[in-house]
Image (cartoon, rainbow, N blue to C red):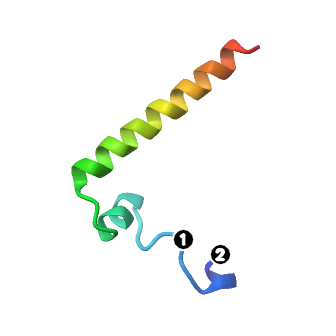
Amino acid sequence: SFKLTGKRVFRMAPIHHHFEQLGWTEPQIVIRFWIVSVVVALAGLSTLKLR
């Protein structure tokens, strides 16, 4: 992506530093990562029940 557009996808690695640079507080980052992980886990578990 960087070679094609000259822009980075994330400003910094690890990814939580990218969100810190966008102005998010650390508790916001942690809570949002937890929410995303729960949603993805539930989606994964629901696909197991479809079989």
Q: Secondary structure at mark 1?
A: loop
Q: Position of residue 17 (x, y in %)?
A: 33, 64
Q: Is residue 40 found left or right of 27 in the rendered image?
A: right
Q: Position of residue 51 (x, y in %)?
A: 76, 13
Q: Is residue 32 found left or right of 49 in the rendered image?
A: left
In the displayed structure, 7 sits above or below 36; it is below
Question: What is the total number of numbered labels drawn onto the structure image?
Answer: 2
Q: Which residue is mark 2?
A: 1
Image quadrant in which you'd find residue 6? bottom right
Mark 1, other Cα within 10 Å: few <14 / some 14–19 / many ≥20: few
Q: Position of residue 42 (x, y in %)?
A: 53, 24
Q: Which residue is mark 1?
A: 9
Q: Secondary structure at mark 2?
A: loop
Mark 2, other Cα within 10 Å: few <14 / some 14–19 / many ≥20: few
Q: Which quadrant, please, contains the N terminus?
A: bottom right
Pick whichever of labels 2 and 1 is earlier in the sequence: 2
User: Disc 2 versus disc 1: distance between alpha carbons?
Assistant: 7 Å
Q: Is residue 26 found left or right of 36 in the rendered image?
A: left
Which label number is shown at residue 34?
none
In the displayed structure, 50 sits above or below 31; it is above
Q: Are marks 2 and 1 in contact (CB under 8 Å)?
A: yes
Q: Front-most of 18 and 28? A: 28
Image quadrant in which you'd find residue 36? top left
Residue type, numbered disc 2: Ser
